[in-house]
Image (spheres, grey):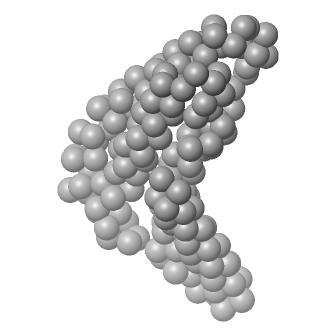
Amino acid sequence: MKVFEKILNCMCVILFIEMAIVTFAQVVSRYVFGISFFWAEELARFSMVWIAFLGAAIAIAHNSHTNINFFVNLLPKTIKKYVEIAQDLVCLFFIVCVIFYSWPIVNITMKNLSTGLRIPMGLVYISLPVSGFIMILYLLIRLYFKVNCKEANAGGEQL
């Protein structure tokens, strides 16, 4: 899983660098040379969408999503473990619903081309199910460790 996470991190870094370069080039070309690239803003926006959803999957792997666990931390370790399992199951259910309802949108938008880049809009919207599948993978691994390990913290911090 470490190799897979490194690939995700590299993808996010590459997309971020590409987004920064394109945005910088767009600003310079517009204000210095008086011309603008018709595709730059769209490429930066699409890159940001992919970064956000892949970053969400990385956050699942690190158990870094925002949560309020003040009361959960007050519980005994055995009950805390079951509450955390329930939290992961609810999250898993939500992600499955998101994938289920986003897939028809991806199919519909594959026929629509973006204005500037002239690529199918489905390539942007598919970031949701792709990152969703990655999140499900990480959640299932975390659930496996929480259920099968006796330690209350097993699989909780980072996969």
Q: Is residue 145 left or right of residue 158?
A: left
Residue 59: horizontal and vertical position, in percent?
A: 60, 44
As displayed, is residue 38 above or below residue 99? below
Residue 37: horizontal and vertical position, in percent?
A: 52, 80
Q: Is residue 64 left or right of residue 129?
A: right
Decide which of 13, 36 is in the foreground and name it: 13
Residue placed furthest toward the front: 150
Q: Residue at x 66, y 28 (%)?
A: 153
Which quadrant would residue 98 be assigned to in this image? top left
Q: Residue at x 69, y 32 (%)?
A: 66
Q: Is residue 55 left or right of residue 97?
A: right
Decide which of 95, 3 is in the foreground and name it: 3
Residue 142: horizontal and vertical position, in percent?
A: 51, 33
Q: Residue at x 56, y 40 (%)?
A: 60
Residue 47: horizontal and vertical position, in percent?
A: 51, 63
Q: Is residue 151 visible?
A: yes
